[in-house]
Structures are given as structure tokens and as C-alpha cells.
Image (tube, rainbow, N blue to C red):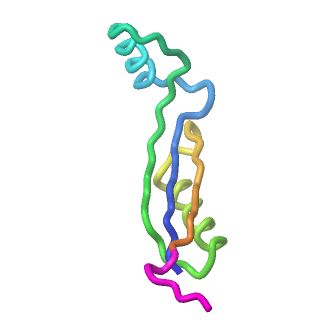
Amino acid sequence: MKFNVEVKVSLKKGMLNPEAKTIERSLDLLGYKVSNTKTIDIIKFDIEKNNVEEVEAEVTDMCERLLSNPVIHDYKIDIIPRKPACEWTK
């Protein structure tokens, strides 16, 4: 079975985020008043496994080993089963 996976990686609360601060300052220079700016990385991919539990276990391992740094990042995994292009119903 195929699944669409989306992983959102963000800095943990309390970590300095210079990218977000730069965006906030730049928007301020353009006349936009914003605060509490955050940035996230979104990684999307397809994976084929037997069930959602297998996908979740494997993607969690990917996040812990490569996609994030568990010391400074939080991550959120969204898993969506892909339906066949044509599905017959009776």
C-alpha cells in the first residue's frame, strides 16, 4: 500500500531562530508589523509499506537519524494513505 508522507521540522521552543528574526525585521522595514515569526521545513515523499504503523515507525526513524536533530528540533509526521486512481465500488 502506498502512503503520502509529510514531515514538518521546526526548532524547539526557546531555540534561537535567526532566519525567522531576519524575516520579521525585513517585513517590519516594508511596513508590516508581525511578531512571533517561526520557520519550518516541510519534507514530502511517498512510501510503500503494509500499514500505517510500519510507515510511522520507519518515518520516525528517518526523522531521528537524518531529517531532524532531536536535540534542537521538533517534528510532526502526517501520513495519508493513497487511494488507487480508479476504485470500483459495488
Q: How far across and how far down the image is residue 8, in percent?
A: 52, 47
**Position above or below: 83 against 27:** below
Q: Is residue 88 magenta?
A: yes
* Magenta residues, dominant SS class: loop
Identified at 55% across, 63% down, the residue is: 59
The quarter holding residue 49 reads bottom right
Q: How far across and how far down the image is residue 79, in percent?
A: 57, 62
Of 18 and 40, nearer the camera is: 40
Q: Is residue 58 magenta?
A: no
**Quadrant in which the C terminus appears:** bottom right
Identified at 38% across, 18% down, the residue is: 22
Q: How far across and how far down the image is residue 31, in percent?
A: 37, 7
**Position above or below: 30 against 64:** above
- Extent of the magenta region: 83-90
Identified at 59% across, 49% down, the residue is: 76
Identified at 38% across, 15% down, the residue is: 27
Q: How far across and how far down the image is residue 6, in percent?
A: 50, 56
Of 68 and 46, nearer the camera is: 46
**Position above or below: 74 against 29:** below
In this view, the residue farthest toward the right is 53
In this view, the residue farthest toward the bottom is 90
- In the rendered structure, the answer to whether residue 5 lies left or right of residue 60 reads left
Total numbered labels placed on residues in the image: 0
